Amino acid sequence: EAQLVESGGGMVQPGGTLRLSCSGSGFVFRRYDMVWIRQAPGKGPEWVSGMDTTGTIPFYADSVKGRFTISRDNAKNIMYLEMNSLKPEDTARYYCARGRSPTDVPARGDWGQGTQVTVSS
């Protein structure tokens, strides 16, 4: 059974940094495009970033471009999201998922359990 586990969330002040991790198991990690999705309370899911299977082609939402960096280590079955210059509007629960493409938002049942990011002074 495919499983995705996110970690690394927390509470930071505006301008701070966090690094999220997504560990995959139960499937051949290197064969899937992977994405990060976030959802704030009362809002719909927002695609944040994605990466192709090779880990060489990143994609970013305009809202995070220049501040977030996605990466993956296929040897370790892990994907990362380095988040810099965090803003209060980045506050959300962050999920990783296997995407049909690096810009895909898959069905909710295909996401991990998520990790909470709160940006507040």
Image (cartoon, rainbow, N blue to C red):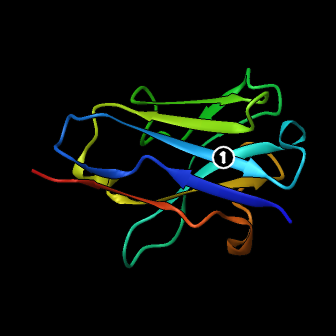
Residue 42, position as x, y percentages in the image: 38, 79
In which quadrant of the rendered view does residue 4 lie? Answer: bottom right
Residue 98, position as x, y percentages in the image: 76, 53
Q: Residues within 10 Å of mark 1 (few under 14, many from 20)?
A: some
Q: Nearer the viewer, residue 46 or 11?
A: 11
Residue at screen point 90% across, 44% down: 28
- The residue positioned farthest toward the left in the image shown: 121
Does residue 52 appear anywhere in the picture? Answer: yes
Does residue 47 appear anywhere in the picture? Answer: no
Q: Nearer the viewer, residue 3 or 98?
A: 3
Local SS, label 1 = strand
Query: What amino acid type should be assigned to the residue bearing mark 1?
Result: Ser
Residue at screen point 73% across, 32% down: 76
Residue bearing the label numbered 1: 23
Residue at screen point 52% across, 62% down: 114
Residue 118, position as x, y percentages in the image: 28, 56
